[in-house]
Image (cartoon, rainbow, N blue to C red):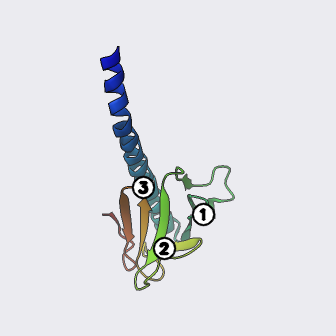
Amino acid sequence: MGIIGLIIASSVPGMTGYARQVRLKAATRETLGLLSLARSMAISSRSTRTVLVNPEAHELLIEETLDEDEPKRVRLSSGVEVEVEIQGQSAPVSGPARLAFQPSGSLSGRSCSLILSNDTKQQTITITAATGAISVK
């Protein structure tokens, strides 16, 4: 019994780190999916679609879907932080940020990055303004 207890006790810290990593990867996939959906909606509807990134609420949502019963949104887990960096600015955007996809699929304004992070790791999603291309680094 003592040996089993030692094995379990030694594996708990590793499992905690693994769970944080899984939450960050899941948040990255969900965010990537929401951004891709907003871009696709802009192209198919031939109208601008705006993604609101709200770091304080740990949430991203497509603003044009707010009137629907279930708006398109991603709620990040409490251990995952998000910040927005606009190309050419030295500091991250403070407060909510809006990313507007045009009917051509391009992003209004400058290219930007969404940085999702937990205590130990971070994932960066980059959106190129000219094409609206979304990539993960």
Q: Secondary structure at mark 3?
A: loop
The residue shown at (48%, 76%) is: 92
Q: Residues within 10 Å of mark 1 (few under 14, many from 20)?
A: few
The image quadrant that residue 120 belongs to is bottom left
Marks 3 and 1 sit apart, C-alpha to C-alpha, by: 17 Å
The residue that label 2 is drawn on is: 103
For the residues bearing labels 3 and 2, Cβ distance under 8 angstroms: no
Q: Is residue 10 visible?
A: yes
Say which label, 3 or 2, has the lower sequence index: 2
Which amino acid type is shown beneath numbered disc 1?
Answer: Glu
Q: Is residue 47 visible?
A: no
Q: Secondary structure at mark 2?
A: loop
Which amino acid type is shown beneath numbered disc 3?
Answer: Asp
Marks 3 and 2 sit apart, C-alpha to C-alpha, by: 37 Å
Say which label, 1 or 2, has the lower sequence index: 1
x and y percentages locating residue 54 in the rendered image: 58, 65
Quadrant including the C terminus: bottom left
Q: Is residue 21 above or below residue 50?
A: above
Say which label, 3 or 1, has the lower sequence index: 1
The residue that label 1 is drawn on is: 56
- Which label is found at residue 68? none
x and y percentages locating residue 68 in the rendered image: 67, 54
- Which label is found at residue 119? 3
x and y percentages locating residue 81 in the rendered image: 49, 59
Marks 1 and 2 sit apart, C-alpha to C-alpha, by: 29 Å
Q: Does 12 sit left or right of 55 as displayed?
A: left
x and y percentages locating residue 89 in the rendered image: 44, 84
Q: Does 126 sit left or right of 51 as displayed?
A: left
Q: Marks 1 and 2: which is nearer the front? A: 1
Which amino acid type is shown beneath numbered disc 2?
Answer: Pro
Residues 97 and 99: in front is 97
